[in-house]
Image (cartoon, rainbow, N blue to C red):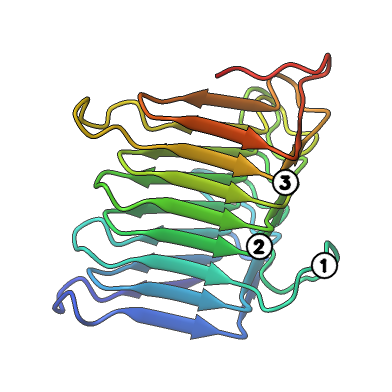
Amino acid sequence: GAVLVNTGGSPSVGVSIANANFWDNFSTGLHVESKGNIILTNTAAWDNDGAGGVSGAYLNNATGTGYIKVTNPKSTDLDMFAGFNNNHDHGLDIFTNGTVTLTNVNVQDNQETGVRIWQELNKGVTMTNCRVDGNGSLSEYGISIFTIGPVVISGGHANNNAADGLHVNNSIADDALPKPVTIKNFTANGNGNYGVYVTSKGAIALSSGKNLKRDGACRI
């Protein structure tokens, strides 16, 4: 696919990609490493296959302080753009110290976790109207978020994934400054384990959604 690395630059120098399509590669579709912001707009990475760590998109700016933002201006399940679908490993793999914002993103039918986010500073993760379905072949999640910061999931769904639909852990946050997890208008149905599984020291708010296991359970 495409490999973009500018970690030799300053944190003010980031990577922006718009209206691009990375597909049918025998390696990760899009691989980005930077110290600055990483911004994808109307971008897709799908049908990437091959042995050993082949994801749709791998985004890593954890050596700096930049944020990561992935946005699709549209919001239908059938949009190919902003789709990270049918890849050998993860659909969208993110490592960062900055904020993460995903909006109207489709992540479907990947062989491992659909969306994996690892964030080591107190910056926060926000997902809005994202559709993460049918991911994992054994025990992988639809969405996996490990962070020290707050998490907001608004709208969208995580259905028919191999293990948990949505798995969030921000419990390593400082006890004196626990961070909340807010999930609203979100649906998780037909997943192999819990629809929603949250581990946190902060307040957890669930509202106006269907957060289900096969038998209607979630774990907080």
Query: Which residue shows up at 46% across the image and 44% down it?
Result: 151
Query: Which residue shows up at 71% across the image and 39% down it?
Result: 135
Is residue 194 positioned above or below 173 on the image? above
Q: Nearer the viewer, residue 10 or 145?
A: 145
Disc 1/disc 3 C-alpha distance (Å): 16 Å
Q: Are marks 2 and 1 in contact (CB under 8 Å)?
A: no
Please indicate whether residue 146 sits to the left or right of residue 46 in the image: left
**Residue under pointer 3:** 185
Task: Residue type at mark 1: give it.
Answer: Thr
**Residue under pointer 1:** 76
Query: Which residue shows up at 67% across the image and 20% down it?
Result: 218
Is residue 206 positioned above or below 71 on the image? above
Query: Which residue shows up at 43% across the image and 30% down it?
Result: 203
Residue 73 visible (yes or no):
yes
Give percent across and percent down for residue 3: 41, 71
Counting residues from the start of the chain, the first of labels 2 and 1 encountered is 1
Q: Nearer the viewer, residue 162 or 220?
A: 220
Disc 3/disc 2 C-alpha distance (Å): 16 Å
**Residue under pointer 2:** 105
Q: Nearer the viewer, residue 176 or 47?
A: 176
State the image quarter where residue 62 is shown.
Answer: bottom left
Disc 2/disc 1 C-alpha distance (Å): 9 Å
Counting residues from the start of the chain, the first of labels 1 and 3 encountered is 1
